[in-house]
Structure formats: C-alpha cells, structure tokens
Image (cartoon, helix red, strand yellow):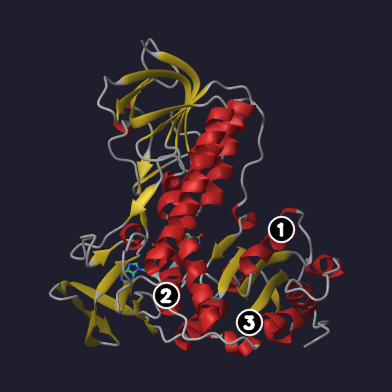
Amino acid sequence: MAQEYDLVILGGGTGGYVAAIRASKLGLKTAIVEKRELGGTCLHRGCIPSKALLRSAEVFKQTKEADRYGISTENPTLNFTKVQERKQSIVDTLHKGVQGLMKKGKIDVFEGFGRILGPSIFSPTAGTISVEMNNGEENEMLIPKNVLVATGSRPKSLPGLEIDGEVVMSSDEALHMEELPESIIIVGGGVIGIEWASMLADFGVKVTVLEYLPHILPTEDEDISREMLKQMKKKGVDIVTSAKVLPDTIEKDNGVKVDAEVDGETVTYEAERMLVSVGRSANVDNIGLENTDIQVENGIIQTNDVYQTKESHIYAIGDVIGGMQLAHVASHEGMIAVEHMADQNPHPMNQDQVPSCIYSNPEVSSVGLTEKAAKEKGFDVKVGKFPFQAIGKALVHGETDGFVKIVADKESDDLLGVHMIGPHVTDMISEAALAQVLDATPWEIAETIHPHPTLSEAIGEAAMAVDGNQIHG
Ligand code: NAD
C-alpha cells in the first residue's frame, strides 16, 4: 500500500536531512529515501572524515615541532591505522546522532534508491516515488505532496585517468587508504587537491600537484592563492601550475607515471599513487527526471531562487543544482525550500553572504567578492590587509603565516569581501559573514571591539587598514 507524505526527500546528506528536520518542525509529514548512509558525502566521504585526517596531520606536525614550544618529544611516529580508526569513530558518532535526530523528528527513513515516477491522477502534484529497497523487498510506493531532490554529487574523473580505486583514486578512496604512500600526484589544485596536499605533506608524503590553470585555488582572491602557493612550497609540496596532464600517457606499473605539458615542454611525473580532484558531477542519473518537466542544463538541475524546479512541487537543492558545492549551502537551501513549501515566505540566499572555508594548513576562508571580481563588476575598490605576523596571539600560537584582506567600495564604503589565510581563519569567518548580512562597512567592523589577545584582532586591524588607520602595522 502506498504511503502518503507532505514531503519526500531523495537523499539524506547534509542538505536532505537538515531539510527533513526543518520540515518536521513545521509540521510536515516527512520521509527520506537514502541509498547509502544518512549524512551523505559530507559525513561519510567528505567534510568530516577529511577534517579528522587533517587534524591528525596537524597534531603530527606540531609534535615534530614541539621543541619550538620548549617540549621535548623523542622521535614521534605515526600510526596510520589509529589515525583511520579515530576518523571512523568520529564519523560513527555523528552518524548515530543523525539517525537519532530522524527518530526524534518522526521522520521515516527508507533505505533504498528512489525514483520519481512523475505526476499522475493518483498524485497530481509531485508524483509517486518508487523506492527500490536495499533489503531486496518489494518496491515501496510513496505519494508525496512535495518532493525535494537532494541527491548530491560524486567525484568527476578525467577520460583516460579513470578511478581504479587502487593506484588512481578519488577522494572517496583516498579517505580509506590503509597505508600512506611514499609519494602521490594530485591532479587538480582546487579545494580538495590543496586540502589533501597539505595533509599528506604534513604526514610526510612527497606530494606533486598538477593544476591546469595558472593559479591553485583559482576561485579564491589572487593574494590568497599566491600565499597558499608559498606555504605549500614551504612544506615541500611540488606545485606545477598551467600543467596540461596528458591522460593517454598514463602508465600504471609499480606506481603511476603520467606526462604533462608545462611551458610547452613535456614533463613526466611519477609517484606511488594518484589522486584526481578536478571537481564533482551532480547525481541526476536514474532518478526519474525524464518522467517530469524538470530542466537539466550542463548536468545540473535548474531551479528558481526558492529551489522549485519546472515542476512546482518538486524542489532541488545542494550539489545537484551546482553553484557553491558546500554542505552549509545545501542545508541552507534545504531550509529555504521547505519553508517555501510550508508558505513561510523565506528570504532567498545571497551568494555574497556565503562563507567558504578550506581546511588545509594554513586554513583559508572567505566571503563576498574577490578584489578582481569586485573590479570586474565596476567597483572602485580600496583594500585593507593585515598580517598575522603582527598579532600577539599568532606569535603565542607559533603560527604567524598569512593575513586578513578586506575589499571595500571606495565610493560607498560598503564591504565587498573578506579573505583570510592563516591560523584558525575558518572559525573566524562568521564575523565577516555577519558583517555582510548586516551590510556593515569596514568602519563598523573596526568599531566592533576585538578582544586582546585574539587572532580576530587581525580582522579589526584589516578593517582599519582599508583607510590606512591600522594600529600595529
Ligand atoms: P574544485 O573545483 O575546487 O577544483 C578543481 C581543480 O581542478 C581546479 O583548480 C581546476 O582548475 C583543476 N582542473 C580541472 N581539470 C583539470 C585537469 N585536467 N588537470 C589539472 N587540473 C584540472 O573541485 P574539487 O577540489 O574537486 O572539489 C569539488 C567540490 O567540493 C568543490 O565545489 C569544493 O568547493 C567542494 N569541497 C569543499 C570543501 C570545503 O568546503 N572545505 C572541501 C572539499 C570539497
């Protein structure tokens, strides 16, 4: 017998499960269909496990450098099996937490693969959802008033550099390595590439990054990507930019060998393993979109600003609609979609108010426009920059690399963007995000009293530096 719901969500990742909780709080009878585990990519194959490994790499690095802090440690060694066990136990704890939240919210979870069958006379608004159950039982039929597609994304591979899971890996397989390789080639110097380069170099792996564009982290402010290049080189990472990998030259014999065209010359790179991190593809296949009028362009579902597709009762959020493929974006979009279904009149999300974070060592965080993007939009910009080198707490921490950069409009004094690289900047970006939401000026950020000694003083100083009024620099 088909079961009726106000909302059925395809995909129980961060976007899907947060939307389900919001829906349940708004009184909607809700179900999630999930083919793998609740928590999705972020919890099982992304944010959480990678950050757990990064933390171990950081502790290992700091322990090796403990002498700097007056602490003697004798020849610290790495037990990678324990590193992996710690990571898994964090994932398991959070996974149980999400399962508990579903129970608390009285959200039904169907473990299986969901397909949209399209609107019909039985279900004229959003259509029936058929769930092919993981346990092999007969398909469940769900009749929802609304559907939310939150099926996420998967790592892209390059033709010729297909992921074999052993020698050529995506981040999915890299997270489950039982042993660290001696050396690795990372194809793609974006967010995943740089987080892994940083982590593996801190664990002692010899890392080469091959990036196609002239800069690593190409979507960040150019000052940030230049500083990151410097910091990665300091760690011993070999970064090759403007590198055109030639996939048909790959040889997998006792490791991996590949040619790349760099500055008009062909160079051969060799390592024990390869990680391909060249972006992610939206999961739009086999979910029944062909039974609907939903538009898919360049592999991503098209929606309006409250995440309705062409079928007004079918919404889509998260990586499957492209844009900023970030967990906090997916969950925010999910809440907007659900509030719209429940006639709550939510505010559309403003991309310039979305913070983004990179958890390498040093960390990167940003919100709003880069200096280049602001100029391209026609703003006459003024910039304030302040280094952590001049911040007492950074010296205390022993981490003085990096800076805070604030971009503002000369004419109106409006804040346009904040970009940071350095210690704990991912925990400091929320101040800048709030400033963006409140339409603050750099002057108002500087008026906000930043406690001493803290790393956040760098934000206050950078805000003053916009008009040349910084104190300590
Ligand atoms: P990305 O888009 O951040 O970076 C991909 C990089 O690969 C780019 O620099 C691109 O120029 C390069 N590239 C593309 N084709 C190439 C080729 N043939 N040879 C060499 N380089 C090539 O993608 P990603 O790093 O794979 O991450 C995927 C998504 O996941 C991104 O949207 C990212 O923001 C998100 N993510 C976010 C976090 C975080 O928030 N900390 C962490 C991991 C992933």
Q: Residue at x 76, y 83 (%)?
A: 392
Q: Could you say which quadrant of the image residue 191 lies in?
A: bottom left
Residue with the mark numbered 3 = 399
Q: Residue at x 63, y 82 (%)?
A: 399
Q: Residue at x 56, y 34 (%)?
A: 101
Q: Position of residue 230 (x, y in %)?
A: 50, 86
Judging depth in this view, the residue of 272 and 382 nearest the camera is 272
Q: Residues within 10 Å of mark 2 (few under 14, many from 20)?
A: few
For residue 436, which numbered disc appears in the image? 1
Q: Residue at x 65, y 55 (%)?
A: 353
Quarter occupied by the C terminus: bottom right
Which type of secondary structure does the marked residue at label 2 adopt?
loop
Please identify, in this view, whether the residue under mark 1 or under mark 3 is nearer the observer: 3
Going from N to C along the chain, the mark reached first, 2 or 1, is 2
Q: Is residue 325 visible?
A: no
For residue 78, which numbered disc appears in the image? 2
State if disc 3 and disc 1 touch (CB < 8 Å): no
Q: Is mark 2 within 8 Å of ligand 1?
A: no
Q: Position of residue 375 (x, y in %)?
A: 61, 72
Q: Could you say which quadrant of the image residue 237 lies in?
A: bottom left
Which amino acid type is shown beneath numbered disc 3? Glu
Vertical arrangement, residue 174 with respect to residue 313, above or below: below
* Picture quadrant of ligand 1: bottom left
Quarter occupied by the N terminus: top left
Measure the alpha-carbon separation of dots 3 and 2: 22 Å
Left or right side of 359 for 439 = right
